[in-house]
Amino acid sequence: MRILVTGATGTLGRAVVPVLVREGFEVRALSRTRRESGGEVEWMWGDLISGSGVPDAVRGADAVVHLATSGRKGRGAVDLPGTRMLLTALREAGVPHLLFTSVVGADRAATGYLKYKLEAERLIAESGPGWTVLRATPFHQWLDQRLRDFESLPVLPVDRSVPWQPVHTREVAARIAGLLAAGPAGTDIEFGGPQVIDTEELVKTWLRARGLRRPCVSVRFPGRLYAAQRAGDLLTDATPKGEITWHDYLFPPPPEPSDDFATEHTASPTSPANQPELDPDLHVYGGDEGYERPTRS
Ligand SMILES: NC(=O)c1ccc[n+]([C@@H]2O[C@H](COP(=O)([O-])OP(=O)(O)OC[C@H]3O[C@@H](n4cnc5c(N)ncnc54)[C@H](OP(=O)(O)O)[C@@H]3O)[C@@H](O)[C@H]2O)c1
């Protein structure tokens, strides 16, 4: 089965591509940067906003995993016009299945970035080809990056009333592989991490793991999105769920010898197998749209 992955270089894409290869899918990966195909991944150049390269990328695919996003600062540019562009190309090429990743709570708290995700879900549901929408909770890797953005602050603001259910991208990737094999499933599929923790625990565990000492000040995060999060709208009870906790992610056990030794050492330098877990040159999902500075509680 040949799968095109949009957003293959992103936080989730870097986990999805190797998982799909390992599961025996033929993987084609889309990026706006020209990359050499190598190993088991065929890289295609394309831009979902201009549409350049998209028809060639979708041609011959049995399914598309659509992970590309312009993030919170991008005002839906990829999630909406980009998704529309992709849907047109899918229809023309007769691709039977589109799997789109959204965010848990998009249907309950359609504000800021989540509003674009919900609108994109609707576009997909009305589009024609078979589809699956997988809503995930925030990724460990994304939260880690957001906390790094605050690392230079002398004091870290925490709101104990705001819960998180972080999930590991590798487990989201495995869920995606299972959904691809099962075929179009529609919506209402949620996938979250194994634990719900409050912001203080999240931040303090992170500080410990990174060897940092910062006082935390108790605040109330403002805004509609945090209100929804406080009310539990961005959490899910759905099963299956991830097993890797925030603590496991931050304090991983020492690596065991990889059974992927051959792949890791024979793939081209641009292959995802050889990409670092966190590539500093790649922008990460997130940003400050809808984020307001916290006030003291
Ligand atoms: N991050 C989270 O915590 C989280 C939680 C739940 C759900 N999600 C969802 O999971 C999906 C993946 O998120 P992510 O965090 O992995 O995203 P990300 O790290 O921000 O990656 C964005 C990707 O989109 C691609 N892209 C951006 N503009 C593009 C364009 N004009 N044309 C083609 N590709 C473009 C980028 O590829 P190039 O730069 O190589 O072109 C990059 O690979 C998104 O749908 C997101 O809403 C994320």
Image (cartoon, rainbow, N blue to C red):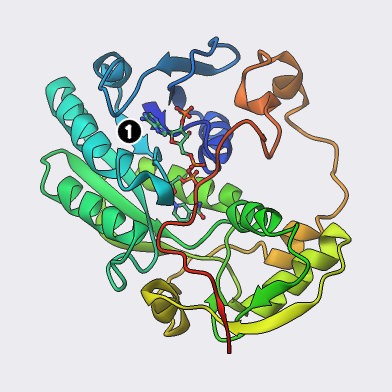
- In what quadrant does ligand 1 lie? top left
Q: Is residue 19 left or right of residue 47?
A: right
Res. 97 in view? no
Rendered position, 189 above or below 42: below
Would you call the spot at circle 1 few (<14 residues within 10 Å), some (14-19), or many (20 or more)? many
Q: What residue is at 28 percent from the left and 13 percent from the top? A: 56
Judge left or right: residue 2 versus residue 87.
right
Residue tagged 1: 64
Q: Is residue 180 above or below residue 267?
A: below
The residue drawn where x is 53% and y is 11% is 37
The quadrant holding residue 32 is top left
Residue 147 position by quadrant: bottom right
Position in image of residue 167 (x %, y %): 57, 60
| Residue 226 pos. (x, y %) | 45, 75
Q: Position of residue 95 (x, y in %)?
A: 21, 28
Question: Which residue is drawn at the image coordinates 77% and 73% (left, top)?
Answer: 204
User: In what quadrant of the picture does the N terminus appear?
Assistant: top left
Q: Residue furthest bottom?
A: 297
Image quadrant containing the C terminus: bottom right
Q: Residue 61 location in percent, x, y?
A: 30, 23
Indicate left or right for 34 with 146 as reference. Answer: left
> How many numbered marks does the figure carry?
1
Q: Which residue is more in the foreground, 82 or 58?
A: 82
Q: Secondary structure beneath disc 1?
A: strand
Q: Is residue 267 visible?
A: yes
Q: Is residue 206 above or below residue 252?
A: below
The residue lying toward the viewer, choosing from 196 and 24, is 196
Left/right placement of residue 141 relative to residue 72 reads right
Given the image, on which type of amino acid does mark 1 rest?
Val
